[in-house]
Amino acid sequence: MLPRRIATLAALAGMFLAAPLAAQDFNRQPTFGTINLNTGFTPDPRFIDVTAGGGLNAERLGRGCTGSIANAPDVRVNFRAGSLPFYIFAQSRQDTTLVVNLPDGSWMCNDDFDGVNPGIVLNNPPSGQYDIWIGVFGGGSGIPARLGISEIPPRR
């Protein structure tokens, strides 16, 4: 009886180990680099060219999250905040989405802030690490995009 249980447990463990794990891992090195910014940074806006998308569905991260994203962050921003807002946005010729892990560990997402381009405005941003993913609405990867960071949000 005991050998059968061990065999069953071993088979179950093998199934779990063989299954791919799909989760955002903000502990991984960002694919397109890390930037350190203090309030009042110049030039403003700061741009980073990225390739949007990936094989993971952002919907499981929370309300408003959509698009396909990579496992590792695209960009990490270490930001020392002041009294100005913090505006994170993406620009692309395709429909992109934005996923941000905030310094407190919570998630913010956006799609279609400005046309099909996503954006997030934090009026009272905390200082700390911001991990940023640019996704592709409807799925896909390899889409050229540009991440923008600014303290001057657009008027809406």
Image (cartoon, helix red, strand yellow):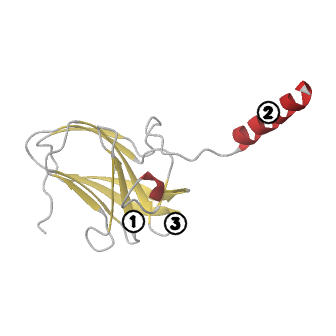
In this rendering, position of residue 77 left or right of residue 143: left
Mark 1 nearby-residue class (10 Å; few <14, some 14–19, many ≥20): many
Q: Which mark is residue 26?
A: none
Q: Which label lies toward us, 2 or 3?
A: 2
In this rendering, position of residue 110 left or right of residue 37: right
Q: Measured from the top left, where is residue 5 in percent x and y?
A: 85, 30
Q: Which residue is mark 3?
A: 139
List the single residue furthest toward the left: 83
Q: Which residue is mark 1?
A: 96
Give the image quarter of residue 2. Answer: top right
Towards the viewer: 156 or 38: 156
Which quadrant: the C terminus?
Answer: bottom left
Mark positioned earlier in the residue sequence (2 or 3): 2
List the single residue furthest toward the top: 2
Which amino acid does the dot numbered 3 rest on? Gly
Q: Which mark is residue 9?
A: 2
Give the image quarter of residue 9. Answer: top right
- The residue at 36%/58% (across/down) is 98
